[in-house]
Image: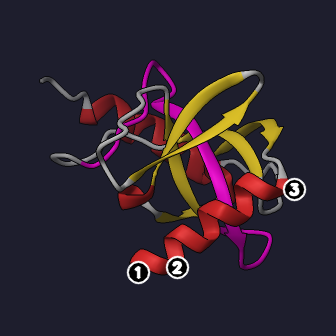
Amino acid sequence: MFKDFDEWNKLKKNIQIGQKIRYFRAREIWWCHIGANIGYEQDGKGRGFSRPILILNSYNRNLLLAVPISSKIKDKNRYYQKISYNNKIYSVIISQIRLLDSKRLIRKIATLNKEDFENIKKYVRSIM
């Protein structure tokens, strides 16, 4: 599979320069510039190398802990946990948890309900 690292690096430079402050909180689901990554790391898609993420924690206005979201449901994989928002079912990919800068955030999509969010947090703690 071809990965366009050169195009991602151009976009990444522009993201770094950007000074737009994003206000975010845990439980929120955002489109995020994830990037073109190595090997089996989850990639972003399209021209913006983006995908939805679930914010697990915010450390300050610049750093957040998040997991990428996929439309693929893998019931037999313990690192994929189901969530529902906007009347659809998705999976958060627990194995791809990562620290991100808020400059990567594009726009807020939704806020996950409290019960699902607490279940995801408990599950993350149990496998770490």
**Mark 3: which secondary structure?**
loop
- In the image, which disc is placed on residue 128? 1
- Bounds of the magenta span? 41-64
Q: Between residues 111 and 64, which one lies in front from this camera angle? A: 111
The answer to if 55 sits in the magenta stretch is yes
Q: Quadrant of residue 35?
A: top left
- In the image, which disc is placed on residue 125? 2
Q: In whole angstroms, how far apart are the C-alphas of marks 3 and 1?
A: 28 Å
Residue 105 at what x, y percent from top left?
68, 45
Residue at 80 percent of width and 49 percent of height: 20
Q: Decide which of tag 3 and tag 2 comes sooner along the chain.
A: 3
Q: In the image, 42: left or right of 109?
A: left
Q: Nearer the viewer, mark 3 or mark 2?
A: 2
Q: Of the residues shown, which amino acid type is indicated by label 3? A: Tyr
Q: In whole angstroms, how far apart are the C-alphas of marks 2 and 1?
A: 5 Å
Q: Of the residues shown, which amino acid type is indicated by label 2? A: Arg
Q: Between residues 53 and 81, which one lies in front from this camera angle? A: 81
Q: Residues within 10 Å of mark 2 (few under 14, many from 20)?
A: few
Outermost right residue: 23
Residue 47 at what x, y percent from top left?
47, 19
